[in-house]
Image (cartoon, rainbow, N blue to C red):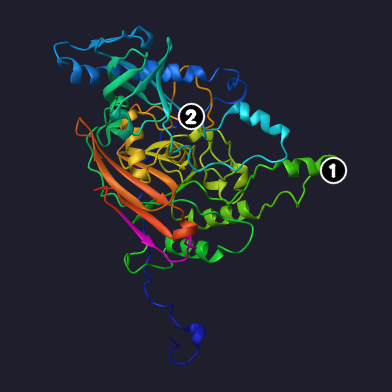
């Protein structure tokens, strides 16, 4: 407004107060459960068979406890079932129970010998979506002593896959086959109380354990951004950015993003960033070696767009980034964090090795699977490969059923290393669930879904199936006080026909 002389240069400043959005800060503690050794400490000479024996040794006491509680005083006719320590010690006609690792012989399952023989052919057959067939599958249980074939009507209704550790009750028939009457598994382990880890750390440091904490807001989870080198999904990415930084809102969420305290990206951020070349491509390139940067073979624009997306939202919203099957990370699980060199703009706000447990991290590139504490709740999440591979063994369409079964088996990747590539662990297997999470999510799933499961010790787990954002435009929200799950759809995805 001008003064009395009409000179706008001498007017007073504008008195309008502009509203600002302030986010509450979430208490964030990454646990680094799945970090692999670095440099010379990382070895691949170990035998993968040792992984199954290690899992059996670690899970056997918990499975035996469940079996003893269920079958300890049980009668089959006039006999009490005997506990047999080894699979090959089972005796014909005597009711007994034994603990071992399941092995399912599936003819459509990948075989390393078949992979070697494919070198003699021009092209390999396509990857199968399912390993199941219409015929009867051979199922066995094994331990360090050997294998025992198992049959039974109850096995047909159970979702059992290679690698899960169970106890079987029954008897061996004259054919040397164990007829199963019932099965037991470890079930959910102990679940930590909310804020248990934070309060334990405070107690060790001599601080006040019980604190009055502010009300927590929401955590947003997305997956499958599938950023490519073209401009096909630019609109979807722009609308997501505008929503997350508060420049736009949604009818079901008029408060926009100001109640979001952290964003989790559950894999699939890039679209086929590191495709494995076919045999024809390898043969065609022989004799045409090219040194240095080859723009025809490598396109940096997908990672540049991902970096731009992250740098736009990081000043106002912390991000936890998991790699996925199409991201430039190791194929074998646990996939290690995406390298900071991929994010020249965002890495200024990334964690450094010296600040691994800094609660104020803006950008945390983590492993897949990933485990951490947010606002006192224990989170366990994957980019989806572990769930997808188990689904190939079963005629089950519900990803939540598979996720629930994996937690109750206490192993989030039972099919590794049989059909899912993984690091050959020897002394300890981080893929075993040692503490029950409060939230378990899987990215890049066919559809959005969620439910709550309860364990034998009153454990409560929220299971979340997160679909691809590029196909659905869905953002999942988790209320960090009630663990209530909601979602919005921005309506910019490209749904499958």
Q: Is residue 286 left or right of residue 463?
A: right
Q: Residue, x 44% and y 46% (percent of image)?
A: 443
Q: Position of residue 352 (x, y in %)?
A: 53, 37
Residue ranking furthest to the bottom: 5
Q: Which quarter of the rendered picture does the N terminus lie within?
A: bottom left
Q: Which residues are magenta?
A: 486-497
Q: Residue, x 49% and y 86% (percent of image)?
A: 8
- Crowd tier of the residue under label 2, counting other residues whose Cα lies within 10 Å: few below 14, some 14–19, many 20 or above: many
Q: What label sits on residue 189 in the rendered view? A: none
Q: CA distance from mark 2 to mark 1?
A: 37 Å
Residue indicated by mark 2: 416
Instruction: Report helix, strand or loop for mark 2.
Output: loop
Q: Is residue 104 above or below residue 251?
A: above
Residue indicated by mark 1: 288
Q: Earlier in the sequence, mark 2 or mark 1?
A: 1
Q: Quadrant of residue 406?
A: top left
Q: Position of residue 480 (x, y in %)?
A: 29, 48
Instruction: Report helix, strand or loop for mark 1.
Output: loop
Q: Position of residue 250 (x, y in %)?
A: 37, 67
Q: Is residue 106 above or below residue 277?
A: above
Q: Position of residue 37 (x, y in %)?
A: 54, 25
Q: Is residue 463 left or right of residue 221?
A: left
Q: Is residue 125 above or below residue 477?
A: above
Q: Residue, x 62% and y 26% (percent of image)?
A: 113
Residue 253 seen from this side = yes
């Amino acid at each position: 407004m001008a003064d009395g002389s009409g000179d706008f240069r001498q007017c007073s400043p504008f008195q309008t107060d502009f509203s600002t959005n302030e986010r509450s800060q979430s208490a964030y503690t990454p646990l680094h459960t799945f970090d692999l050794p670095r440099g010379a400490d990382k070895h691949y000479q170990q035998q993968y068979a040792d992984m199954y024996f290690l899992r059996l040794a670690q899970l056997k006491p918990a499975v035996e406890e469940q079996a003893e509680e269920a079958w300890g005083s049980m009668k089959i006719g006039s006999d009490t079932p005997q506990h047999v320590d080894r699979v090959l010690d089972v005796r014909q006609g005597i009711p007994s129970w034994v603990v071992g690792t399941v092995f399912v012989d599936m003819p459509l399952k990948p075989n390393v010998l078949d992979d070697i023989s494919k070198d003699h052919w021009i092209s390999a057959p396509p990857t199968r979506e399912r390993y199941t067939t219409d015929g009867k599958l051979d199922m066995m249980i094994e331990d360090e002593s050997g294998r025992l074939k198992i049959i039974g009507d109850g096995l047909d209704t159970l979702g059992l896959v290679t690698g899960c550790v169970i106890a079987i009750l029954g008897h061996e028939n004259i054919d040397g086959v164990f007829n199963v009457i019932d099965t037991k598994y470890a079930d959910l382990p102990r679940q930590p109380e909310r804020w248990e880890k934070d309060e334990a750390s405070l107690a060790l440091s001599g601080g006040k354990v019980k604190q009055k904490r502010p009300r927590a807001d929401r955590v947003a989870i997305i997956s499958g951004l599938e950023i490519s080198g073209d401009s096909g999904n630019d609109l979807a990415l722009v609308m997501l950015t505008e929503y997350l930084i508060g420049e736009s809102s949604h009818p079901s969420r008029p408060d926009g993003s100001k109640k979001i305290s952290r964003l989790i990206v559950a894999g699939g951020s890039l679209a086929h960033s590191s495709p494995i070349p076919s045999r024809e491509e390898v043969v065609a390139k022989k004799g045409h070696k090219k040194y240095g940067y080859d723009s025809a073979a490598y396109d940096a624009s997908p990672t540049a767009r991902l970096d731009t997306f992250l740098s736009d939202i990081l000043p106002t919203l912390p991000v936890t980034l998991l790699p996925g099957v199409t991201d430039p990370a190791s194929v074998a699980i646990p996939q290690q964090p995406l390298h900071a060199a991929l994010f020249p703009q965002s890495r200024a706000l990334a964690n450094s090795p010296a600040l691994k447990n800094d609660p104020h991290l803006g950008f945390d590139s983590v492993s897949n699977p990933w485990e951490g504490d947010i606002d006192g709740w224990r989170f366990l999440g994957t980019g989806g490969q572990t769930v997808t591979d188990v689904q190939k063994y079963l005629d089950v369409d519900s990803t939540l059923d598979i996720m629930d079964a994996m937690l109750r088996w206490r192993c989030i990747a039972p099919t590794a290393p049989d059909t899912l590539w993984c690091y050959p662990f020897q002394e300890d297997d981080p893929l075993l669930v040692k503490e029950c999470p409060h939230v378990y999510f899987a990215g890049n799933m066919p559809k959005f879904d969620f439910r709550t499961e309860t364990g034998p010790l009153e454990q409560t787990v929220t299971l979340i199936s997160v679909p691809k954002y590029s196909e659905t435009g869905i953002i999942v929200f988790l209320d960090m006080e009630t663990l209530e799950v909601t979602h919005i759809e921005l309506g910019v995805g490209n749904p499958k026909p």
